[in-house]
Image (cartoon, rainbow, N blue to C red):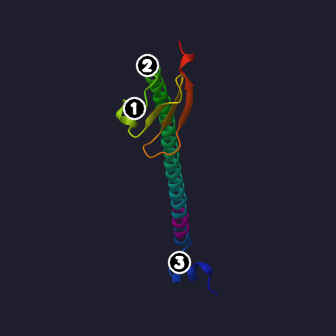
Amino acid sequence: MLSVKTNCRRNGFTASRSRRGAVMLLCMLAAVVIAGAVLGLARSHQQTAKRIESRRAVVQATEMSSSLYQRALVVARNNPSFSGRIDPMTKSALGSYALVSPVSKTETAISVYAYDKATVPAVHAVVDLTAFP
């Protein structure tokens, strides 16, 4: 009767050699799991960066619309008969503009568009110019 130990040695297998293969398999599996986690973190970081950039653009457009509205209001108060387009003074807001048109002797309509081909104004108001001192 042959022992299991001698039979395994004769075929070229030993207990330590088969354990080394299992350890290698576990290490490769761990590397795959870690690589997947790193890719997931990278994708999450990209999505967060896009979300932050989108939020920044919205806030910038809102602030630009507000400042253009204030500028159009000043122009309308100084010249109640003014009718036309007011462009922003900064180059960072190219494309946004305000339209001022008198409705009556005391009222003026102000529409602010966030970009050049916009069909719906970001801000629209009819202002009574006599209400200002």
Which residue has dot 2 on it? Answer: 78
The quadrant in which the N terminus is found is bottom right
- Three-letter amino acid code of the residue under disc 2: Asn
Q: Is residue 112 magenta?
A: no
Q: Element type at marker 3?
A: loop
First along the sequence among labels 2 and 1: 2
**Residue at the spot 62% in from the left edge and 81% down from the top edge:** 3
Q: Nearer the viewer, mark 2 or mark 1?
A: 2
Q: Element type at marker 2?
A: helix
Give the x, y percent position of residue 34: 53, 56
Which residue has dot 1 on it? Answer: 88
How crowded pointer 3 is (Cα within 10 Å; few <14, some 14-19, many 20+) is rated as: few
Spatial separation of the CA atoms under disc 2 and disc 3: 97 Å
First along the sequence among labels 2 and 3: 3
**Residue at the spot 43% in from the left edge and 21% down from the top edge:** 79
Residue at the top extreme of this rendering: 133
Spatial separation of the CA atoms under disc 3 and disc 1: 80 Å
- Three-letter amino acid code of the residue under disc 1: Pro
How crowded pointer 2 is (Cα within 10 Å; few <14, some 14-19, many 20+) is rated as: few
Closer to the camera in the image, 37 or 117: 117
First along the sequence among labels 3 and 1: 3
- Three-letter amino acid code of the residue under disc 3: Phe
Q: Element type at marker 1?
A: loop
Give the x, y percent position of residue 37: 54, 54
Which residue has dot 3 on it? Answer: 13
Closer to the camera in the image, 12 or 79: 79
Magenta residues, start to end: 21-27
